[in-house]
Amino acid sequence: MESIEGQFPYPWHQHCKILHLVRHGQALHNVEGDKNPEALLSPNLFDAQLTPLGLKQVAKLRNEVHASGLFNRIELVVTSPLSRAMETASGCFGREGENAVSSSTPKITAVELCRDRLGVRPSDMRRKMSDCRSRFPWIDFSMASVDVEDDNLWNPELRESEEELAKRVTKLLNWVWKRPEKEIVIVSHGLVLQHILINLLANSDFNPTLTPALCKRFDNCELRSVVILDTSKIGRERWAWLCSDDKAKDVLKQCGHHSIDVATYIYLKSSLVA
C-alpha cells in the first residue's frame, strides 16, 4: 500500500502547529473575586499568586502531561509574565523538585502578548521585570517586548477593551505561527485563551455549532489541545483529500505525533501570517 507521503506529497508540516492551551491554576484573586467582584480592585491582590489549591492543580496537571507523553514532545512553553501563569508553567513543565529547566525540559519564555486583560485590576498588573527575573531565573524574558522594567501597559484608570484584547491575541498568534517550533504550550489566562480559539475558528472551516463547546470558559489548570493546519497553502485537490480528522491524524502520526487523538482539528482558510 502506498505510504501517506506518497499519497500526499506536500510539506504539510511547514504549515501546521499543535498548540496546547493551559489556563493558570487557581490564584488568590479567583477566590476573592468569587466572593465579591469588588475585591478585584484591592491592591492586596497585586499580581495574584497561586493558592494552595492552585499548586495542587499544577502538580496534578504535571503528572498528567508526563503520563501521556506530552511532556517529551513539547518544544516551547510560552507564558504570561504574571506570577500565576509563570508558577503554572514552571510547575507543569519545569524540572521536578527545582522549578527550573534543564536540557531535558522545554524552554519557557515569557511574552507580554499573552498576559491577562490590562488595566484597573491590580491582580492583572505585572511586577517589575527585575523582580520577575529574580523569582523565575529559569524563564527567558528576552523575547517579544518583555524588556521594560515597569509595567507601562497597565493603566489604573482604563480597562483594556475586548476589541483591543482581540487585536493583541491576533499579534500573539502571528508571533507563534512564525516560530520554528511545531508543538507549543501557551500558559495564559481564561479570557486570552478563549480569544485564541475564537480567532482561529473565525478563520477556519470549523462547524459553527461546535464553537460554543470549544470556546467555553477554561477551568483553572485546564488544558485543551488544537491541531492547526493552514489549508490556504494546500491545493484544492489535496485539501479534498485532507478533509477528515482521521486522515489528518494519519499524516501527523507519520511525523511522530502519536498522542493527539484528543485534540481538536482546525483547518485555516487563510494564513495567520500574510
Image (spheres, rainbow, N blue to C red):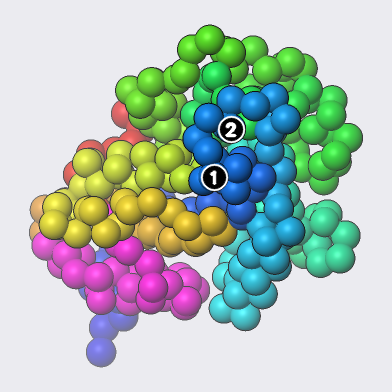
Q: Quadrant of the N terminus?
A: bottom left
Asked whether, in this view, residue 111 is left or right of residue 212, the answer is right
Residue 150 appearing in the image: yes
First to last magenta residue range: 238-266
What is the x, y in percent for residue 2? Answer: 26, 83
What is the x, y in percent for residue 174? Answer: 42, 33
Q: Who's the residue at 19% across and 69% down the image?
A: 244
Secondary structure of the residue carrying tag 1 is: helix
Going by the picture, which residue comes out furthest to the top? 157
Q: Who's the residue at 20% across and 65% down the image?
A: 242
Going by the picture, which residue comes out furthest to the front? 36
What is the x, y in percent for residue 77? Answer: 62, 50
Q: Quadrant of the C terminus?
A: top left
Q: Nearer the viewer, residue 62 or 108?
A: 62
Which residue bears the numbered disc 2?
A: 39
Which residue bears the numbered disc 1?
A: 35
Q: Amino acid at mark 2?
A: Ala
Asked whether, in this view, residue 92 is left or right of residue 181, the answer is right
Secondary structure of the residue carrying tag 2 is: helix
What is the x, y in percent for residue 60? Answer: 65, 71
Residue 153: say if magenta.
Answer: no
Above or below residue 88? Residue 45 is: above
Q: Quadrant of residue 139?
A: top right
Q: Who's the residue at 66% across and 45% down the image?
A: 28
Above or below residue 69? Residue 42 is: above
Asked whether, in this view, residue 227 is left or right of residue 81, the answer is left
Above or below residue 214? Residue 259 is: below
Q: Are marks 1 and 2 in contact (CB under 8 Å)?
A: yes
Q: Which mark is residue 118?
A: none
Q: Amino acid at mark 1?
A: Lys
